[in-house]
Amino acid sequence: MSGIWKATIGETICIQPGQLNPFTYVVIDTETMDIKKYDVNATY
């Protein structure tokens, strides 16, 4: 609800993309540490 879905504690990256949409996932490029969040509104 806060809109914050990633944080850093020391050298540790914490990710919690949320659970409001049917399917939410995060892709992390471990070489560049680029982090992207995707929300998919699937219909079943």
Image (cartoon, grey):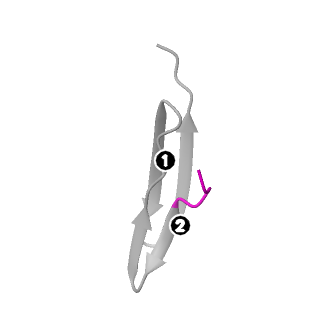
In this view, the residue farthest toward the left is: 12
Residue at point 54%, 51% (across, down): 37
- Mark seen at residue 31: none
Q: Which residues are magenta?
A: 1-5
Determine the CA span between mark 2 and mark 1: 18 Å
Amino acid under disc 1: Gly
Residue 4 counted in the magenta span: yes
Corner quadrant of residue 28? bottom left
- Mark seen at residue 18: 1
As drawn, 27 above or below 14: above
Q: Nearer the viewer, mark 2 or mark 1?
A: 1
Identify the residue position indicated by label 2 in the image: 34
As drawn, 20 above or below 9: above
**Closest to the observer: 32 or 10?**
10
Image coords of residue 20 (percent x, y): 52, 37
Image coords of residue 16 (percent x, y): 44, 56
Amino acid under disc 2: Asp
In this view, the residue farthest toward the right is: 3
In this view, the residue farthest toward the front is: 1
Whether the residues at callouts 2 and 1 have beta carbons within 8 Å, the answer is no
Residue at point 52%, 16% (across, down): 43
Indicate left or right for 6 with 30 as reference: right
Pointer 2 or 1: first along the chain: 1
Q: Residues within 10 Å of mark 2 (few under 14, many from 20)?
A: few
As drawn, 41 above or below 18: above
